[in-house]
Image (tube, coloured by chain):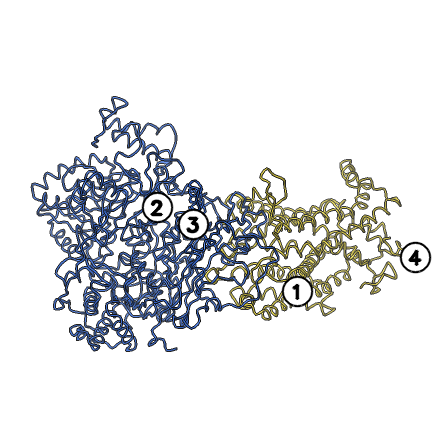
Amino acid sequence: MENKDKKYWRSPGQLKDSPEYRQQLLDEYMTEHSEDPNQFSRRSFLRIMGASMALAGLAGCRRPVEKIIPYVKQAEEVIPGVPQYYATTMPFGNSAYGLIVESHEGRPTKIEGNPAHPSSLGASNLFMQAAILNLYDPDRSSKVFHKGKEKKFDEFITFYKELFDKLRNEKGEKLAVLSESFTSPTLSRIKKDFEKAFPNAKWIAYEPISDENRLLALENLTGKKVQPVYHYDKADIIVSFDADFVQSESDSITAAKGFGAGRKITSPDDKMNRLYVIESGYSLTGASADHRLRLQSNNIGQFVLSLAKVLNQRGYNLTELSSNATIDFNKEWLEAIAGDLQGNQGRSLIVAGRNQPQWVHEAVYLINEALGSFGKTITFTEMDDSLSSSLDDLKALKDNLEQGQIETLIIVGGNPVYNAPIDLDFDKLITKTKSTIHLSEHFDETSSKCDWHIPRAHFLESWGDARAVDGTPSIVQPLISPLQNGISDVEFYSLISAGENKRGYEAVRATWGKLIKGDFETGWKKVLHDGLLENSSSKSITPTLNNSRMTEPVAAQVRSDRLEVVFRSAHLYDGRFANNGWLQELPDPVTKLVWDNAAVMNVKTADAYNLQNGDIVELAVSGRKLETPVWIVPGYAENSIGLGLGYGRKKTGRIADNIGFNTYLLRSSGNMYLSGDVEIIKTDKKYKMSNTQDHNRMEGRPIFRETSLAEYRRNPEFAREMVEHPPLKSIYPDYDYSKGYQWGMVIDLNTCIGCGICTLACQSENNIPIVGKEQVGNGREMHWMRNDRYFAGDDNDPSLVVMPVTCQHCVNAPCEQVCPVAATSHDEEGINTMTYNRCIGTRYCSNNCPYKVRKFNFFNYTKDMPEIVKMAQNPDVTVRSRGVMEKCTFCIQRINRVKRTAKKENRTVYDGELQAACQQACPIDAIKFGNINDPESVVAKAKKIDRNYELLAELNIQPRNSYLAKIRNLNAQLNKD
Amino acid sequence: MNKPAENIAVSSEDVPLITGGQTFSSITEKIVGIIEQKTPKTWYLAIGASLSLLMVLMGSVGFLVWEGTGIWGLNNPVGWGWAIINFVWWVGIGHAGTLISAILFLLRQKWRTSINRFAEAMTLFAVSCALIFPGIHVGRIWIAYYMFPIPNQMDIWPNFRSPLLWDVFAVGTYFAVSFLFWYTGLIPDLGTLRDRAQTRIKKIIFGILAIGWRGGNRQWRHYERAYLILAGISTPLVLSVHSVVSTDFAVSILPGWHTTIFPPYFVAGAIFSGFAMVMTLSIIARKIFNLDHLITLNHLEKINKIMLLTGMMVGYAYSIEFFIAWYSGNIYEQFVFINRAFGNYAWAYWIMISCNVVVPQLFWFKKLRRSIPIMFIASILINIGMWFERFVIVVTSLSRDFLPANWDYFSPTMWDILTFVGSFGLFFTLFLLFIRVLPMISMTEVKGVLPEADPHHSTGESHE
């Protein structure tokens, strides 16, 4: 609580700053009005904002004491109604994503990627978009607890200082810290302080979902800790072994962007990359593949070895690996892949998913090295300032705990009672210590077992830093004072390492003093402005692999008629996003389920056990049992069952609790991702699940249009020629839309991966409510932008396509004509607008909309919204009432903002100045939006591409949106028909 | 059926319209007697049941206003459900009254006299029931008045291109004209009631309602002229109302809705269901009030013949829709019709076909045509079938539209059902009040078709 500024005081009480005075200050308004203590009203927000700042010593000024510099404009003062943008960083496991956060009068409302940051490149992933809702999560813990009793943070400090002295005298002999993994200069510096203070203590990291297998493989082969950096944009041939790199693997944004870069074709003469995916489930990467092979995850390693064998025969030095190959896989496939790899030496990339064991990763790296990919499509950096998750360390900790060697266990973040391997019995282990301390955002499963619970601050409330995957250090700066009295990671680390309650700001500045070259204050301001330290990525290294150190492959032949389960992370990641309604309600891209997880399997497997959607089965994995419902998805590998992690929370919050099934109960340290020891027993029970799409097929309609590259070259106009219709004429005279701005959108289906980030970004930007599982089951989800998923072809081995659909802003809009009160109408810039105040809710517009993109507020969905969640709402967008139709407006609030700016500067809006929320978040630049009247704009050029087609244009509705048809770059060897 | 009656007392088929040797006096006694008698216990029972149902309606509408449209089973593709189905169904039922009164009047169908009064009343009550639904089905009921062209400070008018607005005018006009027509027809009978009234209150009320009716020659001349003009105005309305209602669907671009056959098809269906409802009610009324001599089997047989005709018209419409879907070559259109017959709502489709197309075929046989139990059951089945026709049109088309990703299944909730059931409460309450306080058969007109009324003009046009 130190401050350099001169201290002013309002009353003697404040000067003395006694605990009574603080309490009095907090209680000041309590009797004046009644307020639900569980909720967080605007008034209490202002009070805390005001009071906490006053307590910090700067009476009468609410501005944070530390300097935060806006990203774009210098904000001398806040102009009400004009948002400010700040750069910060979202640490995520061993990686970090740079953000630009929009803030309205001190209230962050929207997260975008930082274009300068190497891991986000201006785009977003699901967790980045959803993080803003986590900030305003009303169920976050706001109090310190000791053995179930509420305490003050100061009491914890007093307790810990005593403990600290005792522990230091013992050199940390009986102390262990279990943290989340990180890559952070400050945390790493503090950890070194910790090691100095407690040389004998243990500090380990555990993440239920991590790249441990991949990193271990590299460490084993190279002898040092290195981080791989993949350059998908440089690869012409990509082979994925169970790696969903566009969506659920680490650093998916750069992967998706790179992959997309190789598929952005504008004419038939352009080159395109080719993607092979060998996988057990159906991932979005599999859906994007040119060729996809279904194979049980347990057999994929053997497939890698067989590929090595074929490559060995073609003259690559992979003798060691190929000698282990025991199964003969589809020769055609192996030859096709090998041929492509050979023909694209140095321009190929093979990746294995985090589900695969260490030896498979090792084999993949060896093949990559043999193919000359190192230094070209894969580079490596040394891992600086990082602590990675280690299962072995966790097992060692278990032994220590069991033997009573640990008296004090400090758990920083994470939720091991819920998500540690079940065979470690963490909930029992934790009781074998004298004292346990847990820093956590929620009072969760682990908190309830620990002695002390300390509320943790959100990263938007904290100072900190993190390194991107290429080593670039980036800054985490707070956008708002902790809403729930949380303690930031840096502050907590400082406290446990040095026994002093130091401000995060000081700690971070202390670290960056060494990182910033030249004048510190100038450099610091620039870092705060940019969000990162420019040109500071770690040096790229090209290690050599020592194949003699390769781990023994699992040679035993795995029979494909044996069941396997694969644990996958989905929208809730490892469960930390379970209390996030946006992510809960975002449909799974493949199953389309919301608010649930299930045992996902293909049709044949379900038939074999006589199962149907919603049947509850008892899954037994290595003897541990769990009842879970079944969901059938075409295209999974036979006898491979996918289980989503992160559901079935018990003590987290009103959204997370009792949603879905806790699959961690089946996950033991021996089978973190895969298990071949599975039994299914059908029960008589049924379970109702909600999904957003009932029908899987296109019924032969020309909706999603695709063809092969060869066919496209033969007939570039194929997409438009898929529909024949009579001349389209209207009885009304046409309005002249050739002047001024004319907004339009193009979605490139060839690059779109169907991740659903557009849905989430739109939800965040446009205040779209969540409606809950039951209402989704009633077909009332509110997403303005949705992703239609269709299967095509054979039911067992179908292809899967995803098509984002939002309002197409038809020039001749059928919705406008039928509205009796003219609540929906066209503006002169071609936007189909909604006048919410005028809408009486006949729903006729929705009935007449062929895309069904209009969403109706059947109930008052915001009625029960906690006050604090209202702070996440965008003040530029109306919150719709009950009985009103709503839909995509092309982010008209953003359009008007840039138009105002342009008008003030006496110019027109230039291309690229304006981005719709969906477009901005898209990691693969599939959405192009702008003024179609400007022939030089990206969107106008995209509309001229031969693959451009308008969905349902034959209805003479003249959609403003259009799609670029998908092209699959098929290998002629595999595509005989 | 259309030639001028040679003998006023008998129909073209030489069967007397009124049987049982009725005289002017016996008709007055019979009809007014129903009102003047002590209220029968069964009436109390019936009104009690009806009021209970009316409470159900008010309760479910109240909850709807309180909670939101979400209490119904609607979802994203299926934006319209039971409310619109009920609206179209009730409007359809409201077609028979004016048709019987106006068109049959213009066509000189004397047999209409026994049933026109309560058929007209039924029209008014059915249209009242119908009018509830467009009002309550909107999301924000409290501003539903935006539909009316009321001048306002925002200078916003309703969108005159929207069929829903046409509906407002078409149904509103229909209700107003039907009411006037019915009231005009009532005036001479109200005079009779006033003259026979025994209490002062009744005398004053009926006196006001009778607006000075004396039964003088000049009054009769004016009256009959006015009645004829109103019949002339009503006639196009009978055809226009349901044609306009059908444009709610036909003007949209939704496969299954977007067809030009809808206006005549809807009108035929409306007459079909209207007559079925008249049949159901008149069988009950003639049984309870012993009106066998006024509403004779001949009347009922004629209604059955009209149902046979209109039933085949809707049957033709069903089949021509399939033909056009195939002939159009439009894949969306084709799918919708195949889906209707064989898809997820096939059960509803086949209920519709059985009730609307198969059941009326019974009336080819004279014996069945004149069998009270058969026609009673058939009339109820036809009304069920016509409700399902609207269900098939509204729900199956919406639930399977252009993009398969949007497809969803509609299931009604308890509130959908209660609102519909409750609307019968309103209908029967109004109907029971009507038969209790007003003459349910037009005394004037029935007397006009008695032999005594014939002034022995060889080629007289009775209502000139």
Residue A127 place in picture, x, y as percent: 32, 51
**Position above or below: B68 against B382:** above
Marks 1/4 same chain: yes
The residue that disc 3 covers is: A771
Given residues A13 and B278, the one toward you in this image is: A13
Amino acid under disc 2: Leu
- Badge 1 element: helix
* Image-quadrant location for residue A899: top left
Residue A134 place in picture, x, y as percent: 32, 46
Amino acid under disc 1: Val
The disc at residue B314 is 1
Regarding residue A182, the answer to whether it shows in the image is: no
Query: Which shade is chain A?
Result: blue
- Badge 3 element: loop
Q: Give the foreground label among 2 and 4.
A: 2
Quick check: A804 left or right of A523? right
Marks 3/1 same chain: no
The residue that disc 4 covers is: B457
* Mark closest to the chain's N terminus, 1 or 4: 1
Amino acid under disc 4: His
